[in-house]
Image: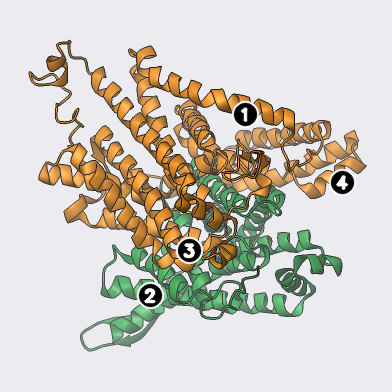
Amino acid sequence: MDYFAQQLINGLVLGSIYGLIAIGYTMVYGIVGMINFAHGDIFMIGGFIALITFLILISVGLTAIPVILLVVLLVSMAITALYGWTIERIAYRPLRHSFRLAPMLSAIGMSFVLTNYSQVAQGARVKPIPPFIKGGYTLHESANGFVIQLSNIQIMVVLTTIVLLAIFTWLVSRTRLGRDMRACEQDQTMAALLGVDVDRTISMTFVIGAALAAVAGLMYLLYYGLVDFFMGFVAGIKAFTAAVLGGIGSLPGAMLGGLAIGLIETFWSAYFSVEYKDVAAFSILIVVLIFMPTGLLGRPEVEKV
Amino acid sequence: MTATSHETTKTRRSAGIPFLLKTAFINAVIALVLFSLMIGIRTEAGSDGQLTYWTRFGDLASLVAAVFGGSIVIELLRQWIGATGAEKLVPASVQNGVSFIGRYLAPALLIFTLLVPVIFYNQRYILDLAILVLTYVMLGWGLNVVVGLAGLLDLGYVAFYAVGAYSYGLLATNFGWSFWVCLPLAGILAAFWGVLLGFPVLRLRGDYLAIVTLAFGEIIRLVIINWQDLTGGPNGVSGIPRPSFFGIPIDNSDDGLAAKLGIEYSPTHRIVFLFYLILALALLTNWVTIRLRRLPIGRAWEALREDEVACRALGINTTTTKLTAFATGAMFGGFAGAFFATRQGFISPESFTFQESALVLAIVVLGGMGSQLGVALAALAMIGGFELFRSLETYRMLVFGMAMVLIMIWRPRGLIGHRAPTVYLTKAQAISSDLVKEGHG
């Protein structure tokens, strides 16, 4: 039971990270109708930028951890968002009215570019950082000595996710930008006729998605203490699985799907085999798409002739 | 950073030097922010696990300058060339030219290919490269059945390649079966896996299908890595026997092919044999595809690509149509895999990554999706291009990714962007592939 509770905590933390990435997939899919293949690599870039900012801040002599975290968060969000914006501008916008395969292939190409760009720029080796946020709480200690622990970093990941989700939900449901986004999602031509700047709205979607991915990258860096250039690929597919599981296009669904994938992966590694945890995640993607193509919270797609 | 349709309209209104400089300056500033940390700072883990960093402001400055200059050049080029109008029907002069070239290019290429081992007999490097190109031509033609003809987007094609390679590798090393027995078996096993994948994904379309096939490809690779008892895991399978000339080994022994023919043995014999083997396999793929296109099943594939709903309304069984497409494509992938295994003598999961799938798909799309000649030319261009960047190993995939993006922007319909229809009323008129659907999945 204690082991289960510990895995539950670990799974929820991992799921929060997946959920943050999944939101980027689901938003872009909702509006542009394409799988942004490069999104997982945006997450990786976010992690790298956070790492480099950390290094600079520490070598400058800053010691106050809250200040460091805040600066790193803002810098990595800003720069990664610019990456998202640039990628949309270069690789996706010229292809918006092209045939269906084109943006997908362009996105795959962009994913290769980002992966290899960071390999060339920062080297192929894994980059570790020392643990920044130490300590935690012991929730429960059982008779046989097994301890359920909740570390501060885990609390921070979950809290950040909740706060970001609140801000993001407010943004989508209450602001002008959110209304534009929802309008573009339903009907781009009509939205344009009614004075919505579609180009700008789509750009902003990519910017927000990339900023959330950057936060996920930072959380990953803090939680696991390392980044490498290839981490975006698998994390990206898992986050996409999460988005599909939750119902693509649905924002609460993305978070829910993220949590589900995080929990499934953690429990699978804990009770079955660590080697096959990715196989489990990918199998879930296939099974979900076959039996529940609209996901948990998605709307069924109507096929028009 | 650079080209957008939105910007083009603006350019035509105010195309002065101040505008040019302003655009270039903005692009340079964006580049500066993008590259500031990733290029300007280089991190590396030291021997004690401690991260260190050093600055590379020189590289950063030259990159930003390159972006500044590059955006001026691109902007100027765009103003000179202007927007190219999209023509739906290929003009008669171009069509005549294309059909003239098309009529003579393919046989000329074939004759040249047949003569390659004669011309380059002493240049081992070129022969090896030619074998590699032909392998990808075959893979491209195989995937073309699935993507180009049936319009099913398959991102996990390398899985069937892997199935073929491991089928031969394991059967040959464990049971000592010969290549010629294993070759059909590898094809059949791969086709079986194609059907196995095809069944669950029948209802999926478009991007969903793409992502599921990708997941399938990754699952196969992960299973190969982790099922160490069978596949040797990351260490792969080694000592895979070389192919024989229908039972006669091609080696230096007394009953080898050279001894039987009464000529002196040279290691090049085996390379030449492999060359003709893959050429025969590739031509078989091409021939079967061309023949199938004229059979009801091939017509059904193309109908499926054009409109699945109409297809169903006309009474075509979409289930069998999709499954046969998957199985046929997978079978050729399996053949190619078996050939790969026998050529290399060693296979490991590293050869079957997603990058391979993307490369083959890029070949098919660059070749114009459905054009056999286009796929062959695209394979030559891609693999040849890869070889050019061989010395810059780390930059290779970077350039490949950029090329993929640029090709999609420049010619999303591929090199040969027109199709000769398979069925016509009185006269075959090539149409721009803008008019051809690419299927919903």
Label at residue A264 = 2
User: Disc 4 on helix, strand or loop?
Assistant: helix
Label 1 vs label 3: CA separation? 33 Å
Please state if B64 lies on the left or on the right of B222 as rendered.
Answer: right
User: Disc 1 on helix, strand or loop?
Assistant: helix
- The single residue placed furthest to the front in the displayed view is B426
The answer for which chain carries disc 4 is B
Q: How is the image coloured?
A: by chain
In this rendering, the label closer to the viewer, 2 or 4: 4
The answer for which chain carries disc 3 is B
Q: Amino acid at mark 2?
A: Ile
Give the quarter of the image for residue B321: bottom left
Q: Which chain is orange?
A: B
Please state if A63 lies on the left or on the right of A137 as rendered.
Answer: right
Q: Which chain is green?
A: A
Does residue B353 show up?
yes
Label at residue B99 = 1
Q: Quadrant of the N terminus of chain B?
A: top right
In this rendering, the label closer to the viewer, 3 or 4: 3
Do marks 2 and 4 share a subunit? Answer: no
The residue that label 4 is drawn on is: B10
List x then y, in percent, for residue B342. 24, 35
